[in-house]
Image (spheres, rainbow, N blue to C red):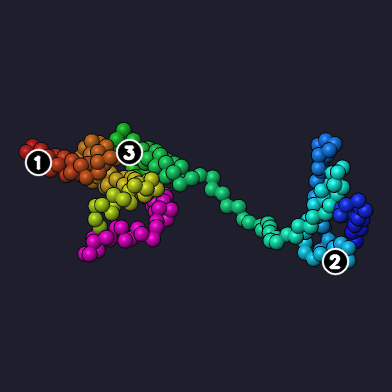
Amino acid sequence: MALLLCSPSSPTISLQSKPSWNTKLHRPCIGVEEQKVLAFRSIDSEVIGMRIAGLGNKIRVQWSFLGGSRVIIQPKVTEMNISRKSSTLSASWLTSSQIACSAFTWGTIAVLPFYTLMVLAPNTDLTRRSMESSIPYVLLGVLYAYLLYLSWTPDTLRAMFASKYWLPELPAIARMFSNEMTVSSAWIHLLAVDLFAARQVFHDGLKNKIETRHSVSLCLLFCPVGIATHVITKVLTQMAKRSH
């Protein structure tokens, strides 16, 4: 309950508040009006027989030596109720660009030991056992599927089959490869296919006793050229054997 007292000299009102009110008092100097802003914490308050309803109504008390004090009631028209909801924080350790770059780098590094064995030590048991294993292709396939999932969008199929004959078109494919994730997934795809082709060349060379080091080396970056080189080498080798 708030108590208001009127001064006889002027239509001023002095205010005595309970300790439950918040009072902010600023007195810069004597002779200058000071303002006190009081906010009700209770839902209903009563001033001079009048009940003021609403949470957050404010009373401004202006006081000066000449005019005394007066009370200005400012009802709060709108009220903002801010509720903080608990949210689940999902953070990714790596951004999409970092994932694409890491997959590109580590995928390239992963296939290099197999090419090194086929070129430097083609006749050792370690090389033969390594090239008979299917683990590299499974790992590359899983990595490729993951990158493909990250780069897939609802417009991927539409871009791949943009023509009326449901065939890929070069401009649409070029737009797809403007994304780093798409380029990285395509690179992993090429690494897996190139390694598989190099293994086939290597096994065929062991079977027919044909030199395959140059063809295997070309399969790393220029797979069709490496396959063509192996075919030419095989034909020339067979021709040389027949001539002897």
Mark sitting earlier along the chain (1/2) = 2
Residue at the spot 25% in from the left edge and 38% down from the top edge: 218
Mark sitting earlier along the chain (3/1) = 3
Q: Amino acid at mark 3?
A: Tyr
Mark sitting earlier along the chain (2/3) = 2
Residue at the spot 76% in from the left edge and 57% down from the top edge: 74
* Magenta residue span: 140-167
Which residue in the structure is indicated by mark 3?
Answer: 115
Relative to 64, say whether 46 is above or below: below
The kind of secondary structure element at disc 1 is: helix
Mark identifier at residue 219: none
Relative to 79, say whether 135 is above or below: above
Residue at the spot 85% in from the left edge and 47% down from the top edge: 67
Quick check: can you spot residue 36?
Answer: no
Residue nearer the viewer, 226 or 169 = 169
Q: Quadrant of the N terminus?
A: bottom right
Q: Is residue 104 left or right of residue 244?
A: right
